[in-house]
Amino acid sequence: MRLKGIIGYLLTPCDDSGGVDHGMLERHVERLIGDGVHALAPLGSVGCLPYLDDAEREAVIRTAVAAAAGRVPVLAGVSSLGTASTARHARYAERAGAAAVQVLPSTYWKLTEAEILAYYREVCQAVSIPVMVYNNPFTTGIDLPVPFLASLAELPNVTMIKESSPDPSKIARLREACGDRAAVYIGLNCMARTGFADGAAGWCTASPNVSPQFALNLYRCAVAGDTAGADDWFGRQIDLLNFLMDHGLPRTVAAGLRLRGFDSGRLRAPLAPLAADLEHRLLGILRKMEIVE
């Protein structure tokens, strides 16, 4: 199984006491499905994965899978610093009904390629569902090279690679190196247009929380071969895409939801709401995009 299209990443909202607000999470799931995303991804960067304990992570996956109710696939984030913990979370996600798992080589000490290969091999052995390898040099401090990522695609469960490097040529090189073994996905918002032009299977993004139709229309134009349309839809949203990344996904997505009129709850401490001056800038961007009045 390989995902296609716009994979919407879910915020993990908290209530006033600091606990995960599962009712609000269910509403976020329903809204994104109603907006037309092709898959859902709880426990990514915008889902504050590192700030949740094991029981909370499992509960978020249960809620997302139950709320999706088979209408779209659920791609669950399961990464932990330790290999055993990552494998355990992957097994839980499979039991809970996730269609696939996303695995990042979370690091404190910089890992070697041999260590990363062993990490992915053990996780793949722990589950039978597809595994998405996630390369994100911004959060791990490691930018996995194309030949190594292609070697990970030889593991039996690895059917997808999410690429978040700012290198504009990397998705094309990954597609060539992986062939039919694994599909490649856009992980960095500013690479969405280049990535689709180079044949990415989908875009993994939190932007549909704020601007769903912009992402979906870009994808529709890209798959239809409408170059001018894809360029236009990308140009209309690039200021927002850059803003979301520049000022921290949980903060900016939560603020964007509020400005659209949706309750986004609280963020998990130590994360704090977007500063007032930045929220004002975001409001200006959304007004220019005609998302809010």
Image: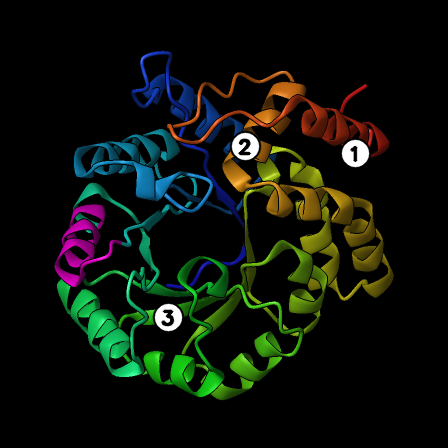
Q: Earlier in the sequence, mark 2 or mark 1?
A: 2
Q: Is residue 179 visible?
A: no
Q: Which residue is mark 2?
A: 251
Q: Are marks 3 and 2 in contact (CB under 8 Å)?
A: no
Q: Quadrant of the N terminus?
A: bottom left
The amino acid type found where label 2 is placed reads: Arg
Q: Which mark is residue 159?
A: 3
The magenta segment is 80-93
Q: Are marks 2 and 1 in contact (CB under 8 Å)?
A: no
Q: Which sits in the foreground, 271 or 12?
A: 271
The amino acid type found where label 1 is placed reads: Ile
Q: Residues within 10 Å of mark 3 (few under 14, many from 20)?
A: many
Q: Residue at x 67, y 36 (%)?
A: 211
Q: Which residue is mark 1?
A: 285
Secondary structure beneath dot 1 equals helix
Q: How many marks?
A: 3
Secondary structure beneath dot 2 equals helix
Residue 245: x and y in percent read: 61, 47
* Image position of 135 (left or right of 65): right
Q: Is residue 132 visible?
A: yes
